[in-house]
């Protein structure tokens, strides 16, 4: 049996102790020193969940391009630079980029990522091809190939994905969004949408779509956030991406209101999908959250938000954990239950 020791993330916060594990199962825990020398010491936390990615555009990161810092010019569908480049890229180029991003996530402790998939059924197929042979779970939230409702297309998409993830109500005819949301909910799948990212959007319309979670909410007012909290809808923060576009979500207000917050890395063409880089950036550039709060945003809270199974790190639970350096939050050891 192998051991790791340090501070273990529990339901009551970090507690000093150790884990003993073998064959990908945790066998024992204790609050003193382990029976033999541990293989690693640090912060012991569940594997990570990256709640918002677009890894289809990973290949763009390696191209020497000066990206416009105007959100609409770069990423807004259907004519943003990103979407034009995706349209002109080969399948092989897109898949290779996705594989590289998947490897980055695996190597840094992410075991689940939620990807907003572009390009309809083909987009789903490309991601599934990239995932082949990779020991990582994906929640695929696809979208129609065109920005219009087609009942048969949505039905086909939902058969092959976890649900639908759309850009924003500003990009769509709202009546089309209602039809999509209704069909997704009847199928028992997830519906999510970017909200109030570049302008404040009508919170009543957003909530009428019955989203399972929202992404960004940069321009949300206090009353908007209160409505979201009362509706028990989590918000995915993608802080580095927002800062790139000179957008600053009011995280102090979000925290004070008490809305559930989880983290994502957003477009892979801008940032590698290492969720630890996201919490390090927030830690170094803001003062609103403790390390424990940030780690909860990439471990416990996203599992609740995405209705994933979650086991406390204890005897007989899967040995799905990461050991982090307590000072710099670098990954020291990863155990993933295969």
Image: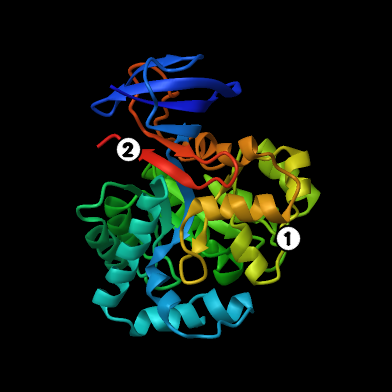
Relative to 49, 140 lies left or right: left
Measuring from the top left, give residue 222's x and y in whole percent. 79, 48
Q: Which disc, if any, is residue 336?
A: 2
Residue located at (44% from left, 78% from top): 83
Furthest toward the front, the residue is: 37
Pick whichever, 7 or 58, lies toward us: 7
Residue 125, labelled with which disc? Answer: none
Query: Height in image: 156 above or below 246?
Result: above
Tag 1 residue:
219
Residue 184 on image: x %, y %: 41, 49
User: How dense is the environment of label 2, judged by Cα within 10 Å: few (below 14), some, or many (20 and up)?
Assistant: some
Q: Quadrant of residue 247?
A: bottom right
For mark 1, give the secondary structure: loop
Mark 1, other Cα within 10 Å: few <14 / some 14–19 / many ≥20: some
Note whether 165 is above or below 147 in the view shown.
above
Disc 2 and disc 1: Cα gap in Å? 38 Å
Please tell me which of labels 2 and 1 falls first in the chain.
1
Q: Residue at x 32, y 37 (%)?
A: 336
């Amino acid at each position: 049996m192998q051991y790791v020791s340090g501070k273990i993330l529990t339901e009551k916060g970090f507690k000093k102790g150790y884990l003993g594990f073998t064959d990908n199962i945790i066998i024992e825990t204790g609050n003193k020193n382990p029976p033999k020398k541990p293989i690693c010491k640090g912060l012991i936390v569940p594997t990570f969940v990256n709640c918002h990615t677009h890894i289809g555009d990973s290949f763009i990161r390696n191209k020497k391009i000066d990206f416009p810092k105007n959100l609409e010019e770069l990423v807004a569908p259907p004519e943003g630079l990103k979407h034009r480049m995706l349209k002109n890229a080969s399948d092989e180029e897109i898949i290779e980029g996705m594989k590289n991003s998947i490897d980055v996530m695996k190597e840094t402790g992410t075991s689940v990522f939620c990807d907003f998939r572009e390009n309809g059924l083909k987009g789903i197929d490309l991601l599934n091809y990239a995932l082949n042979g990779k020991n990582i779970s994906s929640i695929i939230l696809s979208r129609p190939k065109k920005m219009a409702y087609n009942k048969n297309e949505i039905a086909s998409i939902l058969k092959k994905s976890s649900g639908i993830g759309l850009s924003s109500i500003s990009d769509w005819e709202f009546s089309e969004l209602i039809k999509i949301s209704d069909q997704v909910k009847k199928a028992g799948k997830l519906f999510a949408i970017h909200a109030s990212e570049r302008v404040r959007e009508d919170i009543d319309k957003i909530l009428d779509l019955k989203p399972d979670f929202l992404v960004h909410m940069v321009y949300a007012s206090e009353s908007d956030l209160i409505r979201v909290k009362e509706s028990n809808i989590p918000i995915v923060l993608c802080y580095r991406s927002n800062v790139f576009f000179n957008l600053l979500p009011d995280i102090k207000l979000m925290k004070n209101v008490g809305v559930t917050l989880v983290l994502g890395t957003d477009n892979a063409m801008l940032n590698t999908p290492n969720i630890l880089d996201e919490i390090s950036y927030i830690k170094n550039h803001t003062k609103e959250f403790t390390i424990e709060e940030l780690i909860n945003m990439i471990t416990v809270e996203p599992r609740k938000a995405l209705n994933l199974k979650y086991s406390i790190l204890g005897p007989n639970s899967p040995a799905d954990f990461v050991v982090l350096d307590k000072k710099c939050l670098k990954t020291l050891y990863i155990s993933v239950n295969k």
